[in-house]
Image: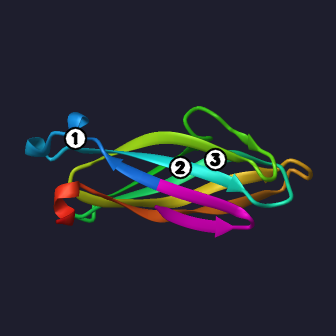
Amino acid sequence: MFTEITAGIKVVVETFYQPTHSNPGQNHYVFAYRITIYNESDETIRLRRRHWFIVDSDNNRREVEGEGVVGEQPVIPPGEYYKYVSGCNLNTEIGKMYGTYLMERALDKKLFYVKIPVFKMVVPSKLN
């Protein structure tokens, strides 16, 4: 697992290789990731936007930005968490992702960024 804490918001990432959706012969590797966002602050927050950087081991880079996550802009009260699963495809057996969430405090509508930790995606056979 990969973890980052910013302003009382903890982001935890777990990754999973998806062999049934991958095609190594065509350099197509699919990974799923589960992200849990814990609100350890005293304020209710809403996740407004995401901004991702995706890098494969050939140093090919992509950038993805948009509203919310998986079609939602979740509200997370203090002491609660929000969990979702998404995915990414790579052209190599190893890659990484990282980025930020743009959050909004419910009380004063103040916007702030929360770091998403750098996390690696590795085909399991590469770990041996």
Q: Which mark is nearer the camera, 3 or 2?
A: 2
Name which residue type carries label 1: Pro
| Region rendered in magenta | 1-13
Q: Are the residues tagged 3 and 2 within 8 Å (C-beta)?
A: no
Q: Secondary structure at mark 3?
A: strand
Instruction: State left or right for residue 45 relative to residue 128.
Output: right
Task: Work out how far the residue at label 3 is from the one at label 2, CA to CA, in angstroms.
Answer: 15 Å
Instruction: State left or right for residue 126 relative to residue 117.
Output: left
Task: Work out how far the residue at label 1 is from the one at label 3, CA to CA, in angstroms.
Answer: 30 Å
**Percent position of residue 41, x then y:** 80, 61
Q: Which residue is mark 1?
A: 19
Q: Secondary structure at mark 2?
A: strand
> Mark on residue 49?
3
Instruction: Classify residue 26 by image quadrant.
Output: top left
Name which residue type carries label 2: Ile
Q: Which residue is mark 2?
A: 35
Name which residue type carries label 3: Arg
Quarter of the image with the C terminus is bottom left
Identify the residue at image location x=55%, y=40%: 84
Instruction: State left or right for residue 112 relative to residue 25.
Output: right
